[in-house]
Image: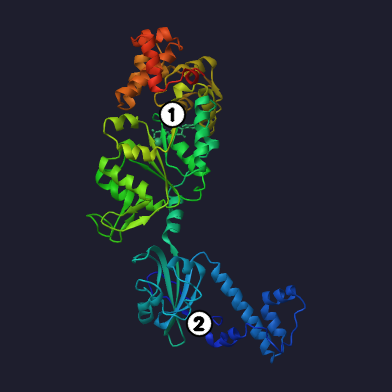
């Protein structure tokens, strides 16, 4: 059989599928009489089947029944093999008559594979079979993408159809194998980086704040509720999202991360929801599934969700409510099963109050809310993260560097780390690159951000430089910085912030700042 992309493909009738050879054998699936060879046990029978040729060679020439028995067993075995292939498989005779359909084909096409045998395929499905022309042209195809939209179903398949010719070169049947496109996407997605690398074991840290967040995330992983991960830039939101996916029952499926801030406004809808063929200038001819459709069965991570335009927020809300997407330029909804994990480094609640984010979407995304504290609030993590990153980059750069001196560590622990773990990691990578000593002592490049008497102002400025935040968020950060730089002395803290102590306590309550947690 010749299999060649874009050229006629044909095969010869196999002796096993030729009805002239096996028509008789198929009739003899009932116990065969007059068998001259006896099988002493099931094992013996299996041994014979495993080497039918030797048995046939040994069998007397007139032992027709024995041959038929072995043939029929082999046919049964072939049927079982075909049924256990992961792809849909159908053999169609001229006139589109179904000669064979396996279970997967039945499931994909919504037909009963047993009852289908002997009937024309077009009577069984509600769209036109694509196999018909192959009988006249003799042209098969390999790995053709098919999108079939019939009233009853939406099929997206990768299809291979191979004509089988007889001795005269006439196409007598077509062997059609197909698999759902989502399987292809899963494989492609995996190798294109659409998979989650991190697990909870990769999340380094021992502070109470981090352990609290990890415990909540582990619990959330067991369910399927939408999640909101909040925290400043670089605290590890994406790491958490990946770990949740990998700990959930969706871990065998895709994890697709979408940075809402990085998508151009005019493409964002088609990226998320897909488009119908030729639905807009630049759209592909065949149409394209969006990220939600592609992630079917898996998780979609919507990073920086606060950057989603309001009109797209409305559409996203529909997807979350209806659990179906409608491609751009299409009217039919496609059912999807995805878990949404959103992340934001902005105060979404404040944005809702300012009408910059839809309240209904906020509540949909925020079924479970996990707040990852900034690094400056989990100082216990700094030494363990430092050891982890020193080991990682020393090994990567093949340097014998083992850590920082105690005084350097002390300075690092006092630093504000506005860029959080990402900044710590980058800092350590830079230090390992530059250092020639086994122990790093000079961390003066950090001094710009070290807490000074003006630490509060510095801290807020550092935070503000990385992103514009709401006034409420700026106030919360100012209070946190003041608490830290004043070592949680409330009188000094109130003085630094120029408010009375009762007012400071009221603000702590309003912002949900727990002294017990920040004091660890
Ligand atoms: N607890 C942790 N243990 C080990 N590495 C961490 C931890 N937290 C964060 N990191 C590392 O810090 C970097 C930033 O993490 P991540 O991208 O998850 O942050 P983010 O909160 O999503 O940031 P952004 O808001 O900027 O997208 C990554 O390289 C990640 O591996
Ligand atoms: Mg991120």
Q: At which x and y percent is residue 148?
A: 35, 65
Decide which of 17, 116 is in the foreground and name it: 116
> Where 132 falls versus 426 (above or below)?
below
Asked if residue 297 can be seen in this view, the reply is yes
Determine the residue positioned at 67% across, 79% down: 52
> Where 45 falls versus 110 (above or below)?
below
Q: At which x and y percent is residue 349?
A: 34, 31
* 1 or 2: mark nearer the eye: 2
Task: Give the structural element (helix, strand or loop) at label 2.
Answer: loop
Image-quadrant location for residue 424: top left
How many circles with numbers are drawn on the protein? 2
Instruction: Report how far apart the C-alphas of labels 1 and 2 lie in the structure.
Output: 65 Å
Q: Label 2 belongs to which residue?
A: 13
Image-quadrant location for residue 374: top left
Determine the residue positioned at 40% across, 26% down: 419
Where ligand 1 lies, by quadrant? top left
Please give the label number shown on residue 516. Answer: none
Decide which of 36, 33 is in the foreground and name it: 33
**Residue furthest bottom in the image:** 62
Q: Label 1 belongs to which residue?
A: 426
């Amino acid at each position: 059989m010749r299999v060649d992309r874009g050229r006629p493909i044909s095969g010869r009738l196999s002796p096993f599928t030729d009805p002239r050879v096996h028509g008789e054998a198929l009739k003899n699936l009932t116990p065969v009489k007059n068998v001259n060879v006896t099988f002493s046990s099931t094992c013996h029978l299996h041994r014979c089947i495993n080497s039918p040729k030797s048995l046939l060679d040994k069998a007397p020439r007139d032992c027709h029944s024995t041959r038929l028995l072995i043939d029929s067993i082999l046919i049964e075995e072939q049927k079982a093999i075909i049924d256990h292939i992961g792809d849909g498989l159908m053999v169609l005779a001229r006139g589109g008559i179904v000669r064979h359909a396996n279970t997967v084909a039945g499931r994909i096409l919504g037909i009963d594979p047993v009852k289908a045998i002997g009937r024309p395929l077009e009577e069984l499905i509600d769209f036109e079979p694509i196999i018909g022309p192959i009988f006249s042209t003799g042209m098969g195809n390999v790995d053709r993408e098919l999108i079939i939209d019939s009233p009853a179903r939406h099929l997206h398949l990768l299809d291979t159809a191979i004509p089988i010719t007889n001795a005269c070169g006439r196409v007598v049947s077509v062997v059609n194998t197909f698999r759902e496109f989502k399987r292809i996407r899963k494989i492609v997605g995996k190798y294109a980086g659409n998979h989650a690398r991190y697990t909870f074991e990769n999340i380094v840290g021992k502070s109470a704040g981090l352990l609290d967040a990890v415990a909540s995330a582990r619990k959330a992983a067991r369910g399927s509720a939408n999640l909101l991960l909040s925290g400043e830039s670089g605290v590890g939101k994406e790491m958490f999202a990946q770990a949740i996916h990998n700990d959930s029952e969706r871990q065998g499926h895709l994890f697709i991360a979408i940075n809402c801030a990085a998508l151009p406004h005019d493409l964002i809808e088609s990226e998320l929801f897909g488009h119908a063929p030729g639905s807009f200038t630049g759209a592909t001819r065949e149409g394209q599934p969006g990220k939600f459709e592609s992630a079917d069965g898996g998780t979609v991570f919507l990073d920086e969700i606060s950057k989603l335009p309001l009109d797209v927020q409305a559409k996203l809300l529909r997807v979350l409510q209806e659990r179906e997407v409608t491609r751009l330029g299409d009217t039919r909804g496609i059912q999807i099963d995805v878990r949404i994990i959103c992340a934001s480094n902005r105060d979404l609640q404040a944005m809702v109050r300012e009408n910059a984010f839809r309240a209904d979407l906020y509540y949909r995304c925020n079924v479970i809310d996990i707040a990852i504290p900034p690094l400056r609030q989990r100082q216990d993590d700094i030494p363990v993260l430092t050891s982890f990153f020193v080991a990682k980059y020393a090994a990567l750069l093949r340097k014998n560097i083992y850590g920082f001196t105690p005084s350097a560590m002390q300075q690092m622990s006092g630093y504000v780390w506005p860029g959080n773990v990402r900044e710590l990691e980058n800092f350590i990578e830079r230090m390992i690159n530059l250092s020639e000593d086994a122990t790093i002592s000079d961390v003066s490049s950090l001094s710009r951000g070290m807490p000074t008497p003006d630490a509060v102002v510095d801290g807020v400025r550092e935070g503000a430089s990385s992103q514009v935040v709401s006034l409420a968020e700026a106030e919360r950060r100012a209070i946190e910085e003041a608490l830290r730089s004043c070592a949680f002395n409330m009188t000094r803290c109130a003085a630094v912030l120029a408010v009375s102590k009762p007012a400071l306590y009221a603000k702590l309550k309003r912002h949900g700042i727990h002294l017990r947690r920040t004091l660890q």
